[in-house]
Image (spheres, grey):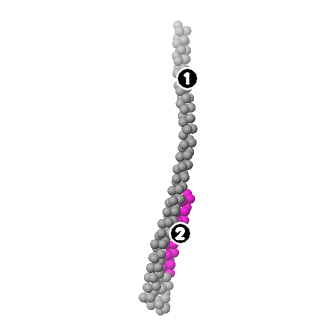
Amino acid sequence: MKNNAQSGKLKKYIYSGIGLASHSREIVQNLMNDMVRQNKLNETEGKKIVANAVKNMQGHLPDIEGKYHQAVMKVVKLANAEIQMLQKGISRLENTAEPKLKGVAKKVAAKKTSARLISRKGAAVKRAVRKAAKKASK
């Protein structure tokens, strides 16, 4: 659960960064268009400034991708550590439960054996009673 929350936060940060970069590009583009319209800047200079801004943002992409990769690997390591901890806990529980189950199985088997013997003796007693009843009625 904890890793899912961390993964969700990481995604939000990444999407926020991408959205911010896209929004910044639009703002720079609009600013340059306004400056060209007001004759404070010619069109080629505006295009050059926008191209430099985009190039600068793209220059930071490898760094952003590297940080993203590191963050993802950290989340994966945390998830793997949590999985191993849970597997150890399950193993420990299985190891403690197994001897108890064997003991219970032996008791159940003994009770079944006793029940069979009692049932056989009960059947023998019933036959003996029937036999005796027949002899008495003759």
Q: Dot 2, crowdedness within 10 Å: few (<14), some or many (≥20)?
A: few
- Near-viewer residue (99 or 113): 99
Query: As shown in the figure, which amino acid type bears the numbered disc 1?
Result: Ile
- Residue 25 x %, y %: 48, 79
Q: Which residues are magenta?
A: 1-27
- Residue 118 x %, y %: 55, 23
Which residue is under mark 2? 13
Helix, strand, or loop for circle 1? helix
Q: Which mark is residue 18?
A: none
> Which-is-in-front pick, marks 2 and 1?
2
Which residue is under mark 1? 118
Quadrant (top left/top right/bottom left/bottom right) for the N terminus: bottom right
Query: As shown in the figure, which amino acid type bears the numbered disc 2?
Result: Tyr
Q: Are marks 2 and 1 in contact (CB under 8 Å)?
A: no
Seen at 47% across and 77% down, the residue is 57
Vertical relation: 110 (above or below) 62: above
Can the viewer see residue 37 in this picture?
A: no
Can the viewer see residue 135 in this picture?
A: yes
The secondary structure that dominates the magenta segment is helix
Q: Nearer the N terminus, badge 2 or badge 1?
A: 2
Seen at 48% across and 66% down, the residue is 69
Seen at 55% across and 38% down, the residue is 99
In the image, is residue 43 part of the stretch drawn in magenta? no
- Residue 54 x %, y %: 45, 79
Vertical relation: 134 (above or below) 85: above
Helix, strand, or loop for circle 2? helix
- Farthest-out residue, top: 138
Marks 2/1: CA distance? 73 Å
